[in-house]
Amino acid sequence: MEKRVRDSYSEQVQILTQANINGYNRLFGGQLMEWIDIVAAVVARRHSGRNVTTAVVDTLTFQAPAYPNDTLNVCGYITYVGRTSMEVCVKTYVESLDGTKELINTAYLVMVALDENEKPTEVPRLMLETDEERKEWEAAERRVRLRKKRNRENY
């Protein structure tokens, strides 16, 4: 069975409050990391139809700050699937009141689908429909090779 990228696309919207802000009056990075992990899990659950666990946070790049009362869009989509794993890209934007969006964070996470015994289980293949989706897949293949190389070097 195959699923399309758009079948599992997920988005979470937040208005930043003081509870989300650090001592520098900016979004607390750990809070954003939690929201990213949740969105990635929803994407992976929608793709796999299974419970999932986070295996790797491969890249997490903070590109710009967010401030109190900003509207945040945390958007996730599948970029690559292996046998039991799925790479999810999560992009975070600050949305201004006129609707324009500024990218402030990009993250890539690897999620693993779990069976009823919490063991890794196979996931549906990914149907690539656009040139952008194919470019994402190719970039993900490079990241998979780099992760495998890093793992070999670290153990």
Image (cartoon, rainbow, N blue to C red):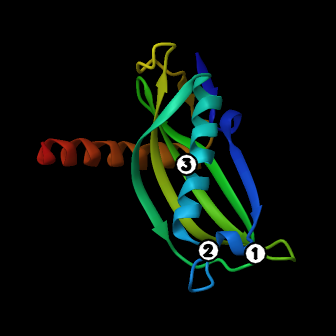
Q: Is residue 118 above or below residue 78?
A: above
For marks 1 and 2, give the one nearer the viewer: 2
Residue 26 position, x and y percent, is 61, 80
Residue 121, quarter of picture: top left
Q: Is residue 50 left or right of residue 12?
A: left
Number of other residues with Cα within 10 Å of mark 1, as a class: few under 14, some 14 to 19, many 20 or more:
some
Q: Secondary structure at mark 3?
A: helix
- Graded by Cα atoms within 10 Å as few (under 14), some (14 to 19) or many (20 or more), the crowding at tag 2 reads many
Q: Quadrant of the C terminus?
A: top left
Q: Tell me whether circle 1 and circle 2 mark residues in contact (CB < 8 Å).
A: yes
Q: Nearer the viewer, residue 73 or 98?
A: 73
Q: Position of residue 128 (x, y in %)?
A: 57, 35
The residue that disc 2 covers is 27
User: Of label 1 and label 3, which has the lower sequence position?
Assistant: 3
Residue 95 location (% of width, % of height)? 76, 71
- Distance from label 1 to label 2 (Cα)? 9 Å
Viewer-side residue, 12 vs 133: 12
Q: Given contact means CB atoms under 8 Å apart, are the residues at marks 1 and 3 in contact?
A: no
Q: Residue at x 55, y 66 (%)?
A: 105
The furthest residue to the bottom: 24
Q: Provide the residue designation for mark 1.
A: 70
Question: In the rendered image, which residue does mark 3 sit on?
Answer: 37
Up/down of 90 relative to 96, above or below? above
Q: For marks 2 and 3, give the CA distance.
A: 16 Å
Callout 2: SS = loop
Q: Is residue 85 above or below residue 40?
A: above
Residue at 52%, 30% (x, y): give it.
52
Instruction: Tell which circle, 2 or 3, labels the residue nearer the N-terminal end.
Output: 2
